[in-house]
Image (cartoon, rainbow, N blue to C red):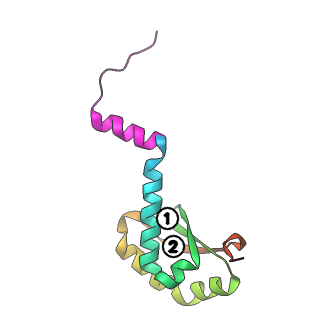
Amino acid sequence: MERKRGPIHVSQALSELIVRRGWARSAGDEQLQEAWKEAAGAKLAQRTRVLGIRDGVLRVGVAHAALLSELESFHKQDILQRIRGIRPDFRIRDVKFLLRGDLASP
């Protein structure tokens, strides 16, 4: 015998709808992109793409090895501190730059 659900609160119904449709993720991705732009600066943000956060590690795609090396060597710690200050709720503990050829300009 199936158990029928009683009435639920509107806020719960909306929360379930948002999760099912994937709207929460796209809003979260948008917030992450904005935080990255602010932390990295416009010039670096144009040459990179946020890929997501996994286990507290912000993953950022980079088109060229030279830029990846520059980010790792000279900018990583500053960007990490800035993004933690901008969005402490993301709980980012590290930034990992990944070489992505698909980001290169044609």
Q: Position of residue 37 (x, y in %)?
A: 46, 76
Q: Which residue is painted at 72% across and 73% down in the image?
A: 101
Judging by the rendered image, the residue that carries numbered circle 2 is: 94
Which residue is depicted at the point 64% across and 82% down? Answer: 68
Q: Which of the two residues, 70 or 105, is positioned nearer the viewer here?
A: 105
Query: Disc 2 marks which amino acid?
Result: Asp
Badge 1 density bin: few <14, some 14–19, many ≥20, Cα 10 Å: few
Q: Amino acid at mark 1?
A: Gly
Q: Against 72, is 99 above or below?
A: above
Could you give the CA–CA distance between mark 2 and mark 1, rounded to whole angstroms?
7 Å
Is residue 80 on the magenta stretch? no
Secondary structure of the residue carrying tag 2 is strand
Count of marks overlaid on the render: 2
- In this view, the residue farthest toward the top is 1
| Residue 91 x %, y % | 42, 65
Image quarter for residue 12?
top left
Above or below, 14 relative to 99: above
- Residue 56's disc number: 1
Q: Image quadrant of residue 8?
A: top left
